[in-house]
Image (cartoon, rainbow, N blue to C red):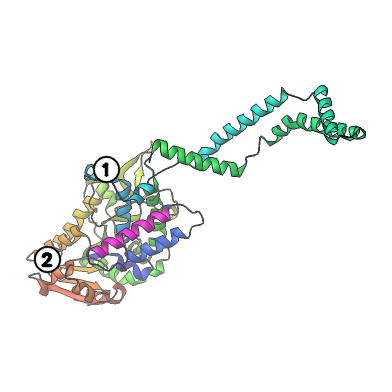
Amino acid sequence: MAMKTTFLFGAGVSVSAGVPTAIKMTEQMLANITSRKRKDRVADVLKYVIGGLMFQNSTKGGDPYAGVNIEDLFNSIAMLGNRRELEAAPFIGSWHYKVDEFDTEMPSIDDYQPIYDAIVYQMMHDIKDAMKNARIDHCSGDKIDQALSGLINKERYYGVAKSIGTEIEKMVNQLPSSIDKNLSTKPKVAFNNFNISMNNVIRDATGKRKGKLFEDAMKVMVRELKHLVWISDADKTAYLDPLLMWCKSGNCASIASLNYDNGIESSAKRLGVRIHNGLECIQENGEFGHQPGSVSLIKLHGSINWTYKRREDGSISQEVIENEDDKFADEQYDPALIFGQKNKLTAKGPFLDLYRAYRDSLNESANLVVSGYSFADSHINESILKWLNRSTAGKLIILDPNVDKLRRDYRGFVHQLMTHPKKDNIEFIQGYFAEGILECLNKV
């Protein structure tokens, strides 16, 4: 019986296709959102959370300038948006003041405008009506003429005074029609003052209200994520060709990927290699269902072109479907993904079934090749340890451009592997995936 091999890939595998690493992706996403023409508070939220995560890393003795993993960013923002639902919420008296400030949702200018218009219009109508009832008659006009003449104090100027009085009479009597013309105008300066005053009154009267800024930030980030990980040029995935052709020969138990991009699918489509992602089989019978003649691709954390199927009534089902390439540009759909290094197991969708398929693949494999993976997911690390503990475990090959750094990190998972009783079964290959995959294939 041929010795099977399982491949486990992280974000580093997709770098050669132009997809940023998990840390570079955070930097690129922040830059893209900050540079948007439409300014909002989402960029401020990202800056605040990224700064907090950098501070947290430094308190643990890590390098504060090492950057922030994109999945940590997603997970933190999702947690802050749902912080009132956390199990520990009853025991937390207050959060950082900026969290509450971001979560304060005050009425916008559009909310105030109708109130302002109603007040100003009513006042102007009341003034107009009052002036209609107090029009200057001829008797009042004569008194104005006499007063002006007395002010001038020269009888010969009575004609001039009478002319001035007549103009005043005309002007006052025309005020109602002048107000009518101005009822359609909105004095901007006065409205801005009104806006500020109303904000202060409502804040003092109602206090802070739960807003949706963290939820909005998640939506904006997912839209940006689509553009960062989707590979539209199939030629960029040519470096994956040797792997797929080797897997097509039948010695590959499966390719397990933690990535959201479409790199492997793109390469397979160009080569004419059939890919089985298990979605239809999981929906039909709850099993991944490896198919003969196909390469099994287990996308443990979902894919950028997966989405939850909508029912006829518009509600979201638990079934995950794969979007066609031509529908990918539709920014309205939400990808079926799971984020966060501490929150990867969920009963929603196919993810538990996919993880079980990955574990089954390990159980039938003599070799495991790991590339581009940061060893930051505890349940993935545990699966590697359990596989290594098996008496039939063969080679564990780790292909990474930062092998020396992984070995020096005494707190990391790789250091734990280096002290394992089967440490002699572990082999390190220095380099990126595109540079070292052929060497890996020759060793399994």
For the residue pair 46 and 274, the one nearer the viewer reads as 46
> Please, which residue is most extreme toward the right here?
156
For the residue pair 179 and 270, the one nearer the viewer reads as 179
For the residue pair 382 and 257, the one nearer the viewer reads as 382
Is 61 in the magenta?
yes
Closer to the observer: label 2 or label 1?
1
Query: Is residue 302 in sight in this rendering?
Result: yes
Rendered position, 176 above or below 255? above
Q: Amino acid at mark 2?
A: Leu
Dot 2 or dot 1: first in sequence order is 1
Which image quadrant is residue 409 in?
bottom left
**Drawn side of residue 283 relative to residue 326, left or right:** left
Q: Assess whether mark 1 and mark 2 are in contact (beta carbons under 8 angstroms).
A: no
Q: Secondary structure at mark 2?
A: helix
Q: Quadrant where the N terminus lies? A: bottom left
Query: Magenta span covers which residues?
Result: 42-68
Magenta portion: prevailing SS class? helix
Q: Quadrant where the C terminus lies? A: bottom left
Q: Which mark is residue 31?
A: none
- The mark total stands at 2
Q: Which mark is residue 388?
A: 2
- At 44% from the left and 42% from the top, the residue drawn is 106
- At 17% from the left and 69% from the top, the residue drawn is 414
Residue 365: percent from the left, percent from the top? Answer: 15, 64
Rendered position, 117 above or below 259? above
Residue 64: percent from the left, percent from the top? Answer: 29, 67
Residue 9: percent from the left, percent from the top? Answer: 26, 65
Q: Which mark is residue 85?
A: 1
Q: Amino acid at mark 1?
A: Glu
Circle 1 packing at 10 Å, graded few (<14), some (14-19), many (20+), is: few
Q: Secondary structure at mark 1?
A: helix
- At 10% from the left and 71% from the top, the residue drawn is 419
